[in-house]
Amino acid sequence: MNHIILSETTMYHGTTLRLDLIEPHVAELCFDRRDGPVNKLDRTTFGELSNALAAIRTASHLEGLLVSSARDGFVVGADIYEFAALFALDEDALAARIRGYTAIFTALEDLPLPIVSAINGVALGGGFELALATDYRVMADAARVGLPEVGLGIMPGYGGTVRLPRIAGMACALDWIVSGTQRRADAAPDAGAVDLVVPQDRVRDVALALLREAIAGREDWRARRRRHHQPVVVDPAALEAARLVTARQAAHYPAASAAVELMAKSASASRDAALTLESQAFAAIAKSQAAASLAGLFINDQLLKKKAKNDSAHGRPVGKVAILGAGIMGGGIAYQSALRGTPVIMKDIAQHALDIGMAEAGKLLDKQVAAGRLTQAKADLVKKTITPQLHYDGVDQADLVIEAVVEDQAIKQAVLAEVERHCGPDAVLASNTSSLSITALARGLRRPHNFVGMHFFNPVPAMALVEVIRGPHTSGEAVATTVAYAAAMGKTPIVVQDCPGFLVNRILTAYLLGFAGLIQDGADFEQVDAALEAFGWPMGPAYLQDVIGMDTARHVVEIIAAGYPDRMSAADNPGSLLADAGRLGQKNGLGFYRYETDSKGKARKLAAADTHALLARLQPGGPRTFGAAEIVDRTMLPMLIEAALCMENGVVDSAAELDMALILGLGFPRYLGGPLRYADFLGMHTVVKRCAIYADDGALYRPTARMIEMAAASHTYFA
Ligand code: 3H9
């Protein structure tokens, strides 16, 4: 039942917007979604917008229209939750649907009266495209505008590629659309995309005043509107630059490149013809793998945010933290915690380790200052909230204690048992381990219910993921407290059950063993790296092990493989062979590759002449050439199987969390959306069929019974 009382001035009222007569000849179209947190352009909104426009057209006394929002933001864009169903339409039907929506914006644009948008908050994607269909845009100083579509694997579809170049010029439009970045108020007017920037509380008044000027004829709104119909002046240099930038990514992320070509093609077209071309190009791009995956990642990310928020409500507040074990890792954790406002005690048994930890925190703060993100005074204050010490004083006041000593079970157990005696009875005790069993580490603790794993990824400030590992005795409150603290640090926590390798390293190990098998069968590691980098990994598996450090990578592979002896074996692991030869990767300048430090202090990767000869020891059959498709399958299939097993074993709660963990923790190619979405994209039937090709290569390629069932029933992980 609708409880809204319609006043005499209400011309139209929907659930997402309303139209009111605010002056005798002026109407206000106000976006005010009542069933959700933000104004967005979904099917309902377009229907209601269409109705509101019809009401305006029948009101012949109207002389001007104000477009505004009653929510904190303006309009956040198209409803991303509708994309899966929308993009499932066949390409022609999708193009027609989108063209239908753009026709509604065109109907707004063509109203025979001046129109001003009052952009009070974020106006992104379709939200900004809505504002571009009006004659003037007044923006709040705190608002942000932009066309972020390429970040979702798509291009603007509601007129952005048509109106922005006609209003602000081709160079601006290419820059905004290709980069996808959100623009603050200081950048928007210079670019010509908005007309005025004013304080937040003045936006509506100033927009209304501007509208009155236009109605009075002191603003030539008709001349401005004519620009929407003029051809775009092609800027060859900007076009060439945009082509160069987008070509590099086009294989996996085709949207930006397609948008550039579309704008080149439609520059001379009439507005309506250009809009038709845009709908067609949009529909083609919406069918890409990146479009499905990246929209999926947005939704996954929202789910994780919600879970962390929920945990924050159930966890204990964390006002102070203690870290045991300084060094680079401890220093990184201390920096991140202090930067986000939680003071830290950093305790170690060695002064030089404390010095390294403080130097690391200081270096990271200096970087923030140099980048203009922190003032020196604020950085100094943050640093003061990190207390390095060799004793346990004050640890009893910490709400959460993170053990970050060397990755050795006996040492960790001893340190944990000792620190537990110094902790408050309710303090959460967390171990930062990448591979040791939380169940085993909890043995010997007096309060195992307070004990949890907290696996930070290296380097801590750069890596968003934190695996929060629940042991058999860990309480819900300890998990919730750790999740909330990790989120407060600005990290993305994902809760996993204790098992060898937890989630990310377990799945990584399956991939590295697939790599090891290829090498044993004679593959050239450089070709494997090249094929997997072309497939979308930031670095191939050989290079990755060099970066991780061969000793660390080897330790992880050996421990985790030992945990799954039925399908994993670390025998003849190339990483172990190189580690035995003292080739630790980047850290000592030689691994699979050789490294030289360039003038900027960065490690430069070079070929190491003798690696092939060394690896030949693992290749009884001699060298063999593999095609890229086989290299991809032999490394990716073990990953997909391990991911499926993690789901089946309940290591993680949902497919969304598993995929996000791999994207954030491992740099899994985003255009694939994560291992499970990739399995969905291939179809489980195809995954199982491809596994059969490698059945002779061992249990690493044996799909689970559930996978076979899913293949038979055409089931997917994501709806
Ligand atoms: C587009 O427009 C394409 C067109 O050209 C053509 C299409 C055919 N859809 O992040 P928050 C929800 S592409 C649905 O927590 P913040 C979000 O789920 C689109 N829902 O807050 C959450 O809901 P809940 C271009 C959306 O302050 C709530 O809003 N637009 C959307 O940290 C608050 O979000 C974008 O890419 C959406 N588009 O950040 C904008 N946006 O409370 C993507 C937000 O129920 N969104 N929600 O969990 C963002 O960048 C951020 O959410 C925003 C707010 C900056 C808006």
Image (cartoon, rainbow, N blue to C red):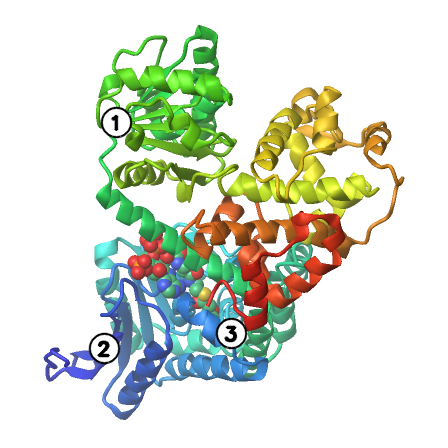
Counting the numbered discs, the total is 3
Could you tell me if residue 337 is visible in this image? yes
Q: Is residue 14 left or right of residue 162?
A: left
Residue 264 place in picture, x, y as percent: 64, 69
Which residue in the protein does label 3 denote? 87
Judged from the image, the secondary structure of the residue bearing numbered disc 3 is: helix
Q: Quadrant of residue 472?
A: top left
Looking at the picture, does residue 398 appear above or below residue 24? above
Which residue in the protein does label 1 denote? 427
Q: 49 or 534, which lies in front?
A: 534
**Of the residues under marks 3 and 2, which one precedes in the sequence?**
2
Q: Quadrant of ligand 1?
A: bottom left
User: How many residues crowd around disc 1 within 10 Å: few (fewer than 14), some, or many (20 or more)?
Assistant: many
Q: CA distance from mark 3 to mark 2?
A: 29 Å
Q: Which mark is residue 18?
A: 2
Q: CA distance from mark 2 to mark 1?
A: 52 Å
